[in-house]
Image (cartoon, rainbow, N blue to C red):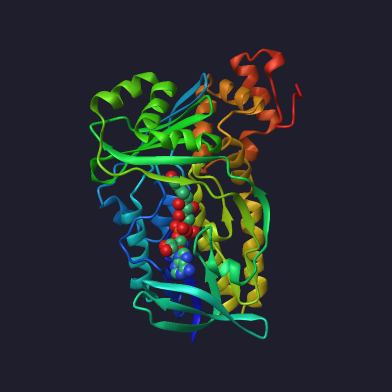
Amino acid sequence: MYDVIVVGARCAGSPVAMLLARRGYRVLVVDRGAFPSDTVSTHFIHQTGLARLDAWGLLDRLRATGVPAVRHMRFSNADVYAEGFADPIEGLAEVYCPRRTVLDKILVDAAREAGAEVVERYTAMDVLFSEGRAVGIRGRLDDGTEREFHGRVVVGADGPNSTVAAKVDAGFYQVVPAAGFVYYSYYSGLDWGYHHRTRDEQQFATCPTNDGLLMLAVMRKRDRYREFRADVEASFQSVFDQVVPELGADLRAHGRREEPFRAIRYADNFYRRSHGPGWALVGDAGYHKDPLTGWGITDAFTYGELLADQLHLGLSGELPIDDAVAEYAKRRDEASAGVFQLTVTMAALTLPPFFYSVLKAVSQSPGYLKKFFAMVGGGYTGEEFFAPHNLAELYEEVGTPPASRILTASGVAH
Ligand SMILES: Cc1cc2nc3c(=O)[nH]c(=O)nc-3n(C[C@H](O)[C@H](O)[C@H](O)COP(=O)(O)OP(=O)(O)OC[C@H]3O[C@@H](n4cnc5c(N)ncnc54)[C@H](O)[C@@H]3O)c2cc1C
């Protein structure tokens, strides 16, 4: 009998398992994959996410993989251009974009070292119930052997298509249909650093990752999927040509693709009920959003830690366990609302007038640029950044014409 069974051993599941095992609980974490292994995901981790790794004693392991530090970012959207970097956030003056083969292995190993039992190549197929409470899982190892595991709590950390969520019938809320799709791969011969560049409903992002390679990703809206797929190589190149022609020319002249393209049409943005009798959902299983703002991994760490803390309160008897887990879900929803809203807005790949006028002004103010990069990294809240009195000051500072001073997302209030 385990205290906690975690299904899914990547960014959300392994930290939950590790943190609870470190507190002395008997924890099982299962995954249908085996590690190291890749998954369809790029690599950006915000400073606040890296701070969690640091607190868990894992950041130096990540650095030791040779993943290069990013200390400068270039953003553009139409004619708005901003470059720079945040002042240190939680002591971190850099960010990293590690391959998931590297990051997820560090997390799984840390869970195992902490004392969690890790079972790979095991697919959870069902959640077991007794008197209305989740009490375990039933599944199958790759060799066909069926196994059941029993525990006090079952945590679904099994991604956006979560089996655990389906079996506990966790309802969706705040569903926003997915806007786009992505193609990405890894290149040698390019020394571009970090870019996030958007124009005419098309976007590319680049980040240096492990093995001296640069990850290049292209995002477009869903209605362009069929056309894009007809000639992926040419479509991919044309986004760089159209968004930043100089980089398009450099890609054509010096870029060498080292791996096959990965592609995915994004899942919808959503929250799912993430607590119930004997169960919880964490990571993308309970709260999923477009990858455009690169918050999935950081949020998996942040709210994974919150869930582990709340489970500890429940398992140790300080609080009724279902109340403790309900509190986790409530706090996650409150804390993540700003990032969720910003992400679904930006994912449309067209800046609404409010964001355009704010970012245009920000790009002209060195002080506000610092705040912008701090907000991107999670060191400054969106609520503060977009507060009308702060925006009024910003517009005044850079001399935005009064007619363009949009102070709220819902309209002009100058
Ligand atoms: C194209 C793309 C790019 C992205 N880029 C970024 C980025 O730059 N930065 C960022 O922060 N986020 C990014 N994300 C989001 C990020 O990948 C996710 O938010 C993050 O992986 C969520 O972690 P997780 O542990 O919840 O789920 P996952 O990483 O999906 O892990 C779920 C695990 O559960 C296992 N599993 C699933 N079902 C079962 C089952 N029935 N039994 C056993 N095991 C099971 C899977 O094998 C998997 O290992 C991107 C996503 C995509 C699709």
Q: Is residue 303 visible?
A: no
Looking at the image, residue 175 sits to the left or right of residue 9; the answer is right
Residue closest to the eye, 52 or 4: 4
Residue closest to the eye, 54 or 83: 83
Q: Quadrant of residue 313?
A: bottom right
Q: Residue at x 52, y 42 (%)?
A: 379
Q: Quadrant of residue 338?
A: top right
Residue 333 position within the rendered picture, expressed as x and y whole percent measured from the top left: 65, 55
Q: Residue at x 27, y 30 (%)?
A: 191
Residue 26 position within the rendered picture, expressed as x and y whole percent measured from the top left: 45, 81
Q: Quadrant of residue 118?
A: bottom left
Residue 220 position within the rendered picture, expressed as x and y whole percent measured from the top left: 50, 34
Residue 10 position within the rendered picture, expressed as x and y whole percent measured from the top left: 42, 61
| Vertical placement of residue 8 versus 252, above or below | below
Residue closest to the eye, 342 or 235: 235
Quadrant of the frame with the C terminus: top right
